[in-house]
Amino acid sequence: MNRHTLSAISMVVLSGVSCAAFSAGAPAAVSDAYRAATKDGLVSVQSRQLDEVYLRPGPEWAGYRKVLIDPPQVVFRKNWLKDLNASRGPSRWISQSDAEEVAKVATASMAKTVADVFVANGYEIVTAPGAGVLRVTPSVTELDVYEPDVAFSRPERLFTKDAGTATLGLELRDSASGALLGVVVDRGTASQIREINRTTQTSNIFWFDAMFRRWATNCVAAIEAGPVR
């Protein structure tokens, strides 16, 4: 599967939503929500699977069985592109357009995975705010893909221990009122099976997909468990 095919796949997945933001280091909206969580009446919830979980106390959580999912925002680790190219020869430099394509594929993966996990847990995906609709805003920040595999005139065999890392965020709001109901922040690693692995574009997508799915599953479990453990 070449990078043009992957780009086409990502655009198909995103055809029903607006284009996600791409940045090389701008702060994500969920980070501001995280800092303000306790000020907005949220309480810290202990989780063995997630680094930080804040939820608003109250019985209203059981009433949310529909979700409105915003397009994810993808933000690379600061200086990711500069640092990556500094470790490579000019013939293997990653261009800005290459980086944007990586971001598009990550956006498509996150958008599809979050929707799939909510549906698998009995939620209905809707496209407009309303009563009993939970607005979900996912984000991928500090994205660090260790060896992005793009087409070069002299392709090389690449090997890594893991595919990369990212900070994954989820902001939860009542879609009708806009009230902040929850924030989840988790640092994830796209872990691979063996100690050293052959790295390709396909393998990177597979392992980041797996990380997104594991995280989204844990997020839904935390939501359904509620603010009291």
Image (spheres, grey):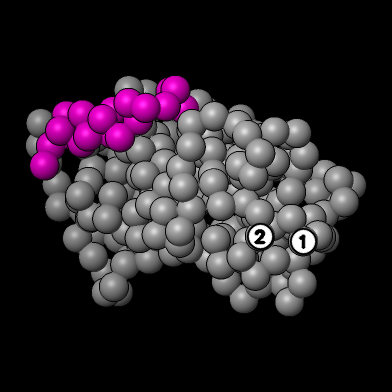
Find numbered disc 2 in the image and state the secondary structure of the residue it sits on. helix
Vertical placement of residue 147 versus 44, above or below = above
Percent x, y for residue 9? 22, 34
Percent x, y for residue 51? 65, 64
Q: Which residues are magenta?
A: 1-20
Frontmost residue, 71 versus 3: 71
Percent x, y for residue 111? 42, 41
Frontmost residue, 127 versus 27: 127
Q: Looking at the picture, which amino acid does disc 2 mark?
A: Ala
Left or right: 129 in relation to 4: right
Say if mark 1 contacts mark 2, CB within 8 Å: yes
Vertical placement of residue 139 versus 184, above or below = above
Frontmost residue, 128 versus 81: 128
Left or right: 34 in relation to 105: right
From mark 1 to mark 2, how far is it between C-alphas? 7 Å
Q: Residue at x 15, y 52 (%)?
A: 157
Q: Looking at the picture, which amino acid does disc 1 mark?
A: Pro
Where, quadrant-wise, is the N terminus in this rendering?
A: top left
Q: Residue at x 26, y 30 (%)?
A: 12
Q: How many marks?
A: 2
- Residue for badge 1: 59
Instruction: Please identify the quarter of the rendering in which residue 221 is found.
Output: bottom right
Look at the image and say whether residue 11 sits in the magenta stretch.
yes
Q: Which mark is residue 62?
A: 2
Left or right: 136 in relation to 91: right
Look at the image and say whether residue 31 sits in the magenta stretch.
no
Frontmost residue, 60 versus 57: 60
Find numbered disc 1 in the image and state the secondary structure of the residue it sits on. helix
- Counting other residues with Cα less than 10 Å from the Cα at mark 2, is it few (<14), some (14-19), or many (20 or more)? few
